[in-house]
Image (cartoon, helix red, strand yellow):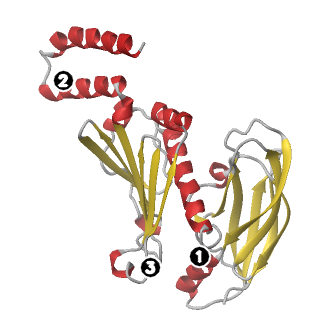
Amino acid sequence: MKHKSQFRWAILLAVLLPLLGACRQPVLNDALTTLNFAISKENITFRVGTSFGECLGYCRTNMEVNGTELDYIEFAWDYARQQVPDRLFSDTLSVEEWSALVDAFDWQTFAALDSVIGCPDCADGGAEWIEVGYFGKTKKITIEYGADLKGLSLFLDQIRHFRRRLRDRIQNGSKFPQVVFSEQPADALQQSPLSVQAAAIDGDVLVAQIAHSGGCREHFYTLYMAPPAFMESYPVQANLYLTQYDNDDPCDAIIQQTRKFELRPIAESYYQSYGGFDHIKLNLHWLENNGELQSLQLDYHPQ
C-alpha cells in the first residue's frame, strides 16, 4: 500500500513539474517542499522553546520532538548557569500521539508566517519559538508566550501539552510542579473539569484534594497564576487556576487524589515587585463539572 501511495505521488509530481516550470524558481521550490512534506511526514522535526527576560532561575526551555522521541531541557540565562544547573528529561510519544501532532501541523500555513509575530517578551510577557526542520531545511518563528496562531491552534495545543507533561515530570524528580505564570484569559486556561474538595497551603506548597472522572489514561495537572501580576489591595491578591488535561480518558470512574504545587515563584515575584515578603491572598479557581468556575481564598505567608 505504501509503494502504491508513493507511486501516485510520483505521477502527480510528473504532472505538476511541467506546469510549474514556467513559474518563478521560489514558487517551484515551495511547491516541491509542500509535496515532499505530504509524501514523507516522518522526516520532520519540531523544536520549540520559551524564554523570559526578567526572570531568575529556570528562565528558558527547549524541547525537540523527533518521531516518537522527546528531549526537554530547562536552563537559566548564561550568567547564572553555573549556579543553576540544567535540568534534562527524555521521554517518548505513542505512535498515535506523534501521528496526531504531525496531522495537526499545516506546513503551508506555517511557511507563510513572519519570522517574528507580535511583541515577544515585551512587558516581561515571555517569548515562545517554533522551529520546523524538514529535508535539511528549517524555518523558525518567534511569538508572544502562549499566543495563538490561526490554522495552527491544535498543533500548538498539543506541543504545549507535551512540554507541560515533561516539565511536570522533571520537576517531580526533586520537588512538586511549580505554579506557571500566564497571560492567558481564564477561559483559555480551562481544559477538563475537576472538583477541589479541600485545599491548604503548607509552607510554600499548595496541597489540594481533588476528584474527577477517569481511570484509563494518565491525566496532567497545572496550576496557573493569571494574570502574572498582583491585584493592589492589602494584602495583595493573586488569581490561581488549577486545571487538568484528561488525555481524552474514556472511563468514568471517580478518581480522588492529592496534588501538590510549588508556590515559591509567587513569593519571588512578590519580592521583586515590593522588595520584601508579606501576606498574599490567593484566589484559587477551578472548572467544575457543571461548566462553572468555583473558587476559594487561601492565605500565603512567604518568608
Residue 269 sits in quarter: bottom right
Task: State the residue at coordinates (26%, 28%).
Answer: 33
Q: Nearer the viewer, residue 266 or 72?
A: 72
**122, above or below 253, in the image:** below
**198, above or below 91, in the image:** below
Q: Mark 3 = which residue?
A: 84
Q: Mark 1 = which residue?
A: 265
At label 2, the amino acid type is Leu
At label 1, the amino acid type is Pro
Q: Position of residue 53 (x, y in %)?
A: 40, 71
Chain-order first, disc 2 or disc 3:
2
Distance from label 2 to label 1 (Cα)? 50 Å
Secondary structure beneath dot 3 equals: loop
Residue 28: mark: 2
Distance from label 3 to label 1 (Cα)? 15 Å
**269, above or below 241, in the image:** below
Q: Position of residue 11 (x, y in %)?
A: 27, 8
Q: Which marked residue is nearer to the observer: mark 3 or mark 1?
A: 3
Task: State the residue at coordinates (72%, 68%).
Answer: 260
